[in-house]
Image (tube, helix red, strand yellow):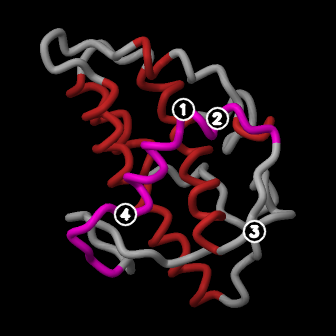
Amino acid sequence: MALLPLRTTFRGPAPKTEEDDIIDESLFYFKANIFFRSYEVKTAADRTLIYLTLYITECLKRLQKCPSKAVGLKEMATLALSKSLPIPGDQGFPMNAVFKAPANRNEEETMRSYLQQLRQELGVRLCDKVFDPETDRPSKWWTCFAKRRFMEKSLLPPGVA
């Protein structure tokens, strides 16, 4: 998985940038990518995009139940910090065939920190897109994708919250 620069205020190992980043790309292409049953992985950045697409789906499942953006932001913060989210190499990770497991404990810690940083920033930006600023309700144009499964995979097994 690529350690790509992020436009974020959250602490973590990712280099900082002021330009569009992988989170912007994942949000922009999400609605098209969600319909893919297969995805050709050419670079490490593709793996990061796959992870973010799977994570967006998990976020949307939770956001569709949130009555307001404030509640949605709390839900996203809780999910981002959740220990139940598997990382590549973990037994429950759905894409271990595509992702390389960390080689050592140091790499594992860096990957966990980076993925947490990605999840935290993505949660904030996703709430900005999903919630209508006038009504403070989730947009059906986003939440309708909560039931879709990217590549027929889910980041969390059924019943795990």
Residue type, numbered disc 3: Phe
Residue 103: image location, x then y, percent: 73, 88
Q: Are marks 1 and 2 in contact (CB under 8 Å)?
A: yes
Which of the marked residues, 2 or 3, is nearer the chain's N terminus?
2
Q: CA distance from mark 1 to mark 3?
A: 23 Å
Neighbourhood count class around disc 3 (C-alpha, 10 Å): few under 14, some 14–19, many 20 upward: some
Residue 105: image location, x then y, percent: 63, 87
In the picture shown, does residue 154 fall above or below 138?
Answer: below
Q: Are marks 1 and 3 in contact (CB under 8 Å)?
A: no
The C terminus is located in which quarter?
A: top right
List the single residue furthest toward the left. Answer: 134
- At numbered mark 1, what does the secondary structure look like: helix, strand or loop? helix
Residue type, numbered disc 2: Ile
Image depth: mark 4 or mark 3 in front: 4
* Residue that numbered label 3 is attached to: 99
* Residue that numbered label 2 is attached to: 34
Neighbourhood count class around disc 2 (C-alpha, 10 Å): few under 14, some 14–19, many 20 upward: many
Q: Are marks 2 and 3 in contact (CB under 8 Å)?
A: no
- At numbered mark 2, what does the secondary structure look like: helix, strand or loop? loop
Q: Are marks 4 and 2 in contact (CB under 8 Å)?
A: no
Quadrant of the image occupied by residue 129: top left
Which residue is found at the position 64% from the left and 54% from the top?
50
* Residue that numbered label 4 is attached to: 21
Residue 120: image location, x then y, percent: 36, 53
Residue 110: image location, x then y, percent: 51, 81
- At numbered mark 4, what does the secondary structure look like: helix, strand or loop? loop
Which residue is found at the position 33% from the left and 16% from the top?
138
* Residue that numbered label 1 is attached to: 31
Q: CA distance from mark 4 to mark 2?
A: 19 Å
